[in-house]
Amino acid sequence: MIGVIAALTIPSLIQSYKKNQIATALKESYSIITNAIRLSEVSNGETGTWNFRQQSDNFAKQYIFPYIKTSQICGWHGIAPAGCFAKENGRYNFQTFNGTKQLYVADNYATAIMANEMSLGVFSSNGIWGNPSAMFAIDIDGPAKGGSVIGKDVFFFTLTGYASDKMVFSPGMDNYNRGYIKRNIDELLGTTIDGACNLTVVGAAERYAGGQCAAVIYKNGWKIPDNYLIKAF
């Protein structure tokens, strides 16, 4: 009887432990970047005055990397040396969590390893999306573990402004200034918005599948909800 109970409960306990590890690491990375932005504002002025039009490498070196403890800073734009994110065929590679797509979104990211061994990517995006914003990618277990799967060990944060609102740093992707951070958990777990945290997301949203998973965990009190669609922890 004891063996049967153990067989039923131990896998659940292990999964719960791993989920807590992921959520804790995500919260830690959010705090680190938030603090870096605040420190940077002391030296560089409020985020709304920052130059988001410059290349990601220059943007990160001016506004972000000096205010985060790092053990390594790599290059950017597909020519970065191995070490800061997992690479495939010479390119940084994130895998969408349905396991069938490859997302090479990290090519234009300035990258580093933080002192806590998490990977950090910074992408200044104003020149592409037309609104001042920067995307942050985190690999919570570094480049050599976890498979670099979006929503499992790779997560995104965004620093952006909503129309005339003050710029906000928030979990999840908000790259088209559509206010996704204002959506509820059910919407972020749906199939229609860009980067939905959903295994079956289709169409244009599929390219960034899982990009909103950090927002889901954040909105759930820094806990992975029961209906979170990644089970292979």
Image: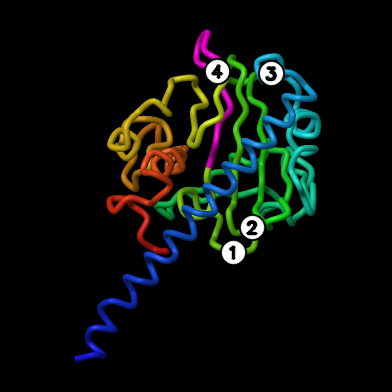
Q: Could you tell me how many numbered marks the image carries?
A: 4
Please name the residue that numbered disc 1 is placed on: 145
Q: Residue visible at 28% across and 83% down?
A: 7
Local secondary structure at mark 2: loop
Q: Amino acid at mark 2?
A: Gly
Query: For residue 46, what is the image quadrant?
Result: top right
The CA distance from mark 1 to mark 2 is: 6 Å
Q: Amino acid at mark 3?
A: Glu
Local secondary structure at mark 1: loop
Q: Residue visible at 46% across and 49% down?
A: 151
Please name the residue that numbered disc 4 is placed on: 161
The CA distance from mark 4 to mark 1 is: 34 Å
The CA distance from mark 2 to mark 3 is: 30 Å
The mark closer to the camera, 4 or 3, is 3
Residue 63 location (% of width, % of height) = 75, 29
The CA distance from mark 4 to mark 3 is: 12 Å
Q: Amino acid at mark 4?
A: Gly
Left or right side of 5 for 89: right
Q: On screen, 209 above or below 127?
A: below
Please name the residue that numbered disc 2 is placed on: 142
The crowding category of the residue bearing disc 4, from other C-alpha atoms within 10 Å (few below 14, some 14 to 19, many at least 20), is: many
> Earlier along the polypeptide chain: callout 4 or callout 3?
3
Left or right side of 69 for 136: left
Quadrant placement of the N terminus? bottom left
Please name the residue that numbered disc 3 is placed on: 46
- Which residue is at the front of the view, 175 or 77? 175
The crowding category of the residue bearing disc 2, from other C-alpha atoms within 10 Å (few below 14, some 14 to 19, many at least 20), is: many
